[in-house]
Amino acid sequence: MKWRSLQESNETDLRPLREIYAERKGLIEKYVPQEIREIHARVVAELKTSATAERALPAGTRVQNFKLKDHDGKLVSSAELLSKGRIVICFIRGRWCPFCVGQVEAMNLLVPDIQQAGASLVVISPQTVQQSYFMRDQHKLRFPLLSDAGNVVAHQFGVAYKVPDYQQTLYKRVFVNLPHANGDESWELPIPATFILDRDGTVLYASANEDYTERPEPAEILQILANSAS
């Protein structure tokens, strides 16, 4: 299934993210075989049972500085970004995930507003620099896509997990080649998560969800930035 970007459809989709996701879930329900949907649902259920999201850094935690390469291979330092203002950090699985695509496109529309609120936006995934470059170019994104090789920063934020063997088998069957996309054989991914860091590196806001089909509304993130402005 090919997931059209907003640019490909020549439209700017201003609907809430939950409505965009509801549409995509409907398409999956219609076109993706039930046995495949059940495997993905099983993984989400197991992650919830193990309370994976509860291991994510909570608000009030001081985050260690990190450096990651962006889509152009340039090293980006969290300390440097924080010297200019707050940071909104979104952890995504990769460009192969339609819900990740929906989220980054929705966040992309608010980049000027995020900057106006005195913050910057970065998106972190385990995909390679090349995959990040392709994603940014395809979807005309206006913020850095950072490649977290080996999910080092995802582990730091407490949002990394290993894809179970039975889902690895499915991904191989449907040509989701994570070792190629991520450049390693770990089969690790982050659960979708969004954090807002204050200028001293303290977590002002944290949202992590084992269900990859649920993400915070971009407008809510913008409102939190406005409410927490000093």
Image (cartoon, rainbow, N blue to C red):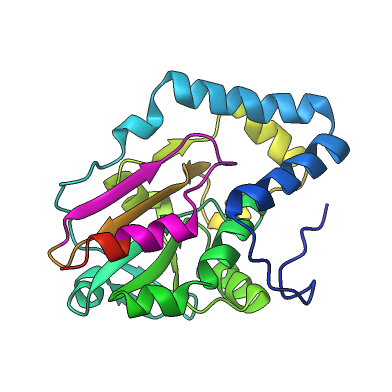
- Image height of 93 relative to 106, above or below: above
Q: Nearer the viewer, residue 203 or 218?
A: 218
Q: Residue at x 76, y 30 (%)?
A: 36
Q: Residue at x 51, y 79 (%)?
A: 142
Specify whether 76 is left or right of 220. left
- Image height of 40 relative to 60, above or below: above
Q: Quadrant of the C terminus?
A: bottom left
Q: Is residue 27 visible?
A: yes
Quadrant of res 224: bottom left
Q: Residue at x 51, y 47 (%)?
A: 215
Specify whether 184 is left or right of 151. right
The reply to whether the magenta stretch includes residue 210 is yes
Q: Position of residue 180 (x, y in %)?
A: 62, 56
Q: Nearer the viewer, residue 26 or 145?
A: 26
The reply to whether the magenta stretch includes residue 116 is no
Q: Residue at x 69, y 26 (%)?
A: 39
Q: Which residues are magenta?
A: 201-224
Q: Nearer the viewer, residue 212 or 189?
A: 212
Specify whether 182 is left or right of 193. right
- Image height of 54 relative to 134, above or below: above
